[in-house]
Amino acid sequence: MGKRSNRLALLRFFAGLVLGWATSWVILNGGFALLRASWPEYALAEPEKAYTLAMLFVRLLIFSSMIVATSSVATLVAGDKRVAWVAGGLILALSIPPHLYPGYVWDDYPAWYHITYLLSILPLALFGGQAVRRIFPGETAAAQQGAAADEPQRVPIDA
């Protein structure tokens, strides 16, 4: 690959991560705002984190949607399936401290909630990356073909 195509691929990779991160912010803030507005009991339970089992499952659903959307957007923008691994790894790395260390949110939720959330991050991120490649196969393939088009043509040398 030429220097230009390497730079473009790297720029797309980081742009995918940034736009994926923005997507996660929108999904989480929008999802929880919608949840508070549509479920008065949830809004009352939120300050004390006195969630019912149903509320905990809905929270996990919002987080799961965020992970899938984040990796999907990142993969679509980057045109590279590896960005789903990176996006999932970043979400996991940022989620481990508050979910596993006492004093953050560990005491606020049952252990199964933390375990379910943390163990689902990478599989959901990979699913999001694969799903977007199946839904928009030309988009990610176009990025790879565009990078290949910038590559200088090599003529085989016959001996």
Image: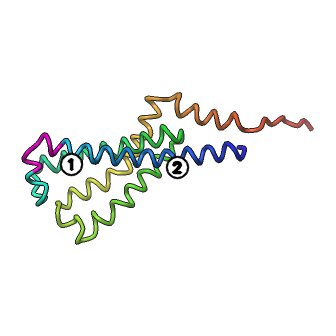
Residue 117 to residue 142: above or below: below
Residue type at mark 2 is Phe
Going 42% across and 44% down the picture, which residue do you hit?
A: 71
On the picture, is 13 further left or further right than 156? left
- Give the mark nearest the N terminus, 1 or 2: 2
On the picture, is 157 further left or further right than 105? right
Q: CA distance from mark 1 to mark 2?
A: 28 Å
Going 30% across and 43% down the picture, which residue do you hit?
A: 27
The x, y position of residue 96, in whole percent, is 33, 63
Contact, mark 1 vs mark 2 (Cβ under 8 Å): no
For label 2, the crowd category at 10 Å Cα-Cα, with few meaning under 14, some 14 to 19 and many 20 or more, is some
Q: Is residue 99 magenta?
A: no
For the N terminus, which image quadrant?
top right
Residue 59 shows which numbered tag? 1
Tell me the magenta residue range: 35-43
Going 24% across and 68% down the picture, which residue do you hit?
A: 104
Residue 46 shows which numbered tag? none
Q: What residue does disc 2 label?
A: 14
Badge 2 marks a residue whose secondary structure is: helix
Q: Quadrant of residue 58?
A: top left
For the C terminus, which image quadrant?
top right
